[in-house]
Image: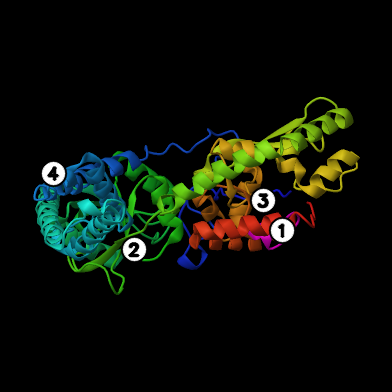
Amino acid sequence: MTTESTSVPPAPGAWPPASREHAHGLASLAPRRGAADRLALPPRRSARTRLAAAPLVAADALAVLLAAGPLAEPYREVRLLLLVVGGVLVLNGSAGLYRPGPLTSVLDELPTLAVRVGVAWCAVAAAVAAYTPALAIGPVALCSTYATQLVAVCLLRGAVHARRRRAARAHPRSALVVGGSAAARRFAAALGQHPEYGIRPVGIVGARQGSDLPQPTGEMGLPVLTTTEEIHRAVIQNTVLDALFLTDDPTLVMLFQHYGCTTWRVGEQRHGGPMGEHLWGYGCRRLVPPAERRGLTAKRVLDVTLAGLAMVLALPVLLLCAVAVRLSDGPGVLFHQERVGQNGRLFTLLKFRTLRPADEAESATRWNVANDRRMSAVGGFLRRTSLDELPQLWNVLRGEMSLVGPRPERPYFVAQFSKVHAGYADRHRMPVGLTGLAQVHGLRGDTSIEDRCRFDNHYIDHWSFWQDVRILLRTAAGLVRPAGS
């Protein structure tokens, strides 16, 4: 197989201009050698985000129960109501109605709610008419139920949004503003004068004006942060929950998302979306981390299903490989090696041993052993056919890897590649994989790291469930004519 890549940026300091920002990552996602497994980051807040959606979920479910009042007794059956509740929650969740913006109004949501409530009830009415015609819901009852639920959901969600706005005004969330100094100061001043948005700027992230000059101070006495350490310290000390970007900076976006902050793109011109999505006239949209994209649950289900099935079907092959390695190379059938996974987490990758390194240093820092004379005939065959990678199915089942994603690399090479290859740090935004877009394009073994990095980031930026299926099919087709590494 290959020894591929993941990310560790250079020593912290002032970051370079935008044109070079990716060549020099801002934060180490993989630890330096001898350091702790993870960077000392604030705890993630995904659980808080899910908990914040609970009142809206309860409002939608309660509206269904209130709407069922005008219906006759058979239609108030628990199973029917659960079906409607489930349909409404799924449809609303897919529309992003449980991730409201800073000043979301129920009037902004009304068109989306109206369509989804109608779809849910029409689907249930059609199913009842098809399977129990005697209990078919008449048009008058259906329209009455629809109108009742729409009114109820508007009132209930309106109350939830009003409560959220009052709480946000009373307890504003700390935020950092990222952008050019003058624009960031104006935007921070606007937010400071309008507490109804529930956001309190505590600092500006901008470029260093001069290494020998004192750090500038922004509007309202806000400090201007220019290094990774300053950002890290500000996030921890001020419990920063939001990062507001006035400019596009993928490296910083990934850094703040790694800290567990909600990231927003502010001020860009775009068409569509509710008119209420603004901060004092500055348009805003949430920048969704790849890990939160819709469909990733299906990706994990695909991983577990296919990896489990593959392990069962490949069990005879696994046993034959293990016996061959034991007879050819002696004890130690499995090779354990530290690799860098999603968000810089270290994990132990499993392979069948094809060569016994001289020591741990060689294992961690030698790039390729494909033509090493110490490799036995069995080891060479396993590498050429990629059978040495089969134990990684266990890594997939454990959740340390995915079937499809950027190939994981050793921390030593992650650190080296991150210093010289643009965007290399961004490869850790999604789980690492057994195969990937780069591999199905022939980028395995001693091939361009820059090309692999570009393919990996393109895969992450345009990920879809179907693309994973396509890559798996192409990988399976490629096994017919294995090239090895």
Which label lies toward us, 2 or 3?
3
Residue 4, numbered label:
3
Q: Residue furthest front?
A: 134
Q: Give the answer, above or below, for where 301 lies relative to 22.
A: above
Q: Amino acid at mark 3?
A: Glu
Decide: few, some or many residues near mark 3? Use Cα within 10 Å; few <14, some 14-19, many ≥20. Answer: many
What distance separates the C-alpha of mark 2 from that of mark 3? 33 Å
- Left or right, 322 with respect to 237, comes to right
User: Hey, which quadrant is residue 458 in on the image?
Assistant: bottom right
Q: Is residue 349 visible?
A: yes
Disc 1 element: helix
- Sooner in the amino-acid sequence: mark 1 or mark 3: 3
Residue 104 position within the rendered picture, expressed as x and y whole percent measured from the top left: 18, 58
Question: Which residue is denoted by mark 1 in the rendering?
Answer: 477
Measuring 57% from the left and 37% from the top, which residue is drawn there? 397
**Tag shown at residue 179:** 2
Q: Nearer the viewer, mark 1 or mark 3?
A: 1
Give how far across and how far down residue 371 sits, in percent. Answer: 86, 48
Mark 3 or 4: in front is 4
Q: Are marks 1 and 4 in contact (CB under 8 Å)?
A: no
Residue 159 rendering spot, x and y as whole percentages: 10, 50
Residue 73 disc label:
4
The earlier-in-sequence mark between 3 and 4 is 3
Which label was assigned to residue 301?
none
Q: Amino acid at mark 4?
A: Glu
The part of the chain drawn in magenta is 438-447
